[in-house]
Image: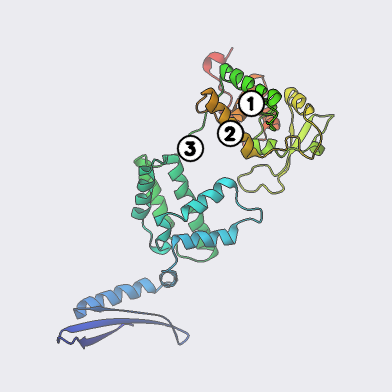
Amino acid sequence: MATITKRETAAGKAKYKADIRIKKAGRIIHRESRTFDRKKLAEEWANKRELELQDQSGLEKVRHAGTLIGDVIEQYEGLFEPAEGWGRSKGYDLARLKTYKLAEIPAVVVTSQDLIEHVRWRISGGVSPATVNNDLIWLGVIFKAMRVARGIPLDLGVIEDARMICRQHKLIARSNQRERRPTPTELWKLSRYFWRKQYRDRRNKIPMLDIMWFQIYSARRDAETCRLRWDDNNNERQTGMVRDAKHPMFKKGNHKRFKYTPSAWKIIQKQPKDGEYIFPYDPKSVSTSWRRACTVLGIEDLHFHDLRHEATSRLFEAGYGIEQVQLFTLHEDWKTLKRYTHLKPEDLA
């Protein structure tokens, strides 16, 4: 029960102090007070506040009042980050979230208005709706995990409300699926450029001509290509292995065997067997070489990863079914592969 205490200021004006004390097992576990000019206001505040603090969530909100969103993100990282670390995109997104003004807001009192304002601020800086959507997705994941794991009374509803309003007003959106494929002319230009680099430039160490066409014939991700090992190849069956393959839930130890196409197999047989890896190069260096070539040749909006899309599309065009293509590409979900078929009504006999 709250107590209301009357006192007078030096000027002789009456003040009313509402003091709330909550005990458990004879010990005070929470205490707070507030002063008002009128007794009725003090009583109304005390009654309302006591109701808020009656359940455990009210007390937990008080206990975590100083926990900022940035603190919650750090606690989440400390509790759930796997030994091998986050994936590149998740690690980058979490680190970035901690740098925003949003991270300075107490987590238990953040509102949908705060989140919408964050989205609008990000959009004003030229960020795409799909990228901003990731901010809200990760906050939802973090809030749900820490609500359960640490008992922090985080309101998941404010995130869902903010996402609903932002979707309605097109402030956030799902990522667009890229459909970009290199044209025959672009492939000719790139092949010619990389041939000169590979066979004429002695300073060049990365055989980009071989790697480019290996990507087109194998459908490997760039990081996977640079991790392929000679001792994982089965020469009789012309298969290889992707170690720690990409997976939405886990990747460490997720080794998967795949089938080489005949053309991809021919390319790797050309590589010097003087080390553990078939293509012993840094994926970042490979991507940099690709971007430089596209800039020099005036090729716009062609990503190195688009070669995987090109390769997958070619497999379907060669007549393979989804279940067969998956043995080459190692896509986790057959639904993902459907978008690569590019079938149109006029293609049917």
- Placement of the N terminus among the 4 image quadrants: bottom left
Inspect this view and state whether residue 288 appears.
yes
> Looking at the rendering, which quadrant does residue 185 occupy?
top right
Q: Which mark is residue 311?
A: 1
Distance in Å between CA atoms under marks 1 and 2: 14 Å
Question: Height in image: 213 above or below 148?
Answer: above
Q: Residue furthest left?
A: 12
Which residue is situated farthest in the right direction here? Answer: 236
Q: What residue is pinned by disc 2?
A: 336
Q: Amino acid at mark 1?
A: Ala
Mark 1 surroundings within 10 Å by alpha-carbon count, few (fewer than 14), some (14 through 19), many (20 or more): many
| Residue shown at the point (63%, 19%) measured from the top left | 192
Q: Residue 217: where, in percent of width, then height?
A: 68, 25
Earlier residue among tags 1 and 3: 3
The amino acid pointed to by label 2 is Thr
Q: CA distance from mark 1 to mark 3?
A: 21 Å
Between the C-alphas of marks 3 and 2, the distance is: 14 Å
Q: Position of residue 160 (x, y in %)?
A: 41, 51
Please state, as top left, top right, bottom left or bottom right, where the C terminus lies in the image: top right
Task: Return the residue at label 3.
Answer: 175
Q: Can you give x and y, in whole percent of width and height, for residue 135 in the image?
A: 46, 49
First in residue order: circle 3 vs circle 2: 3
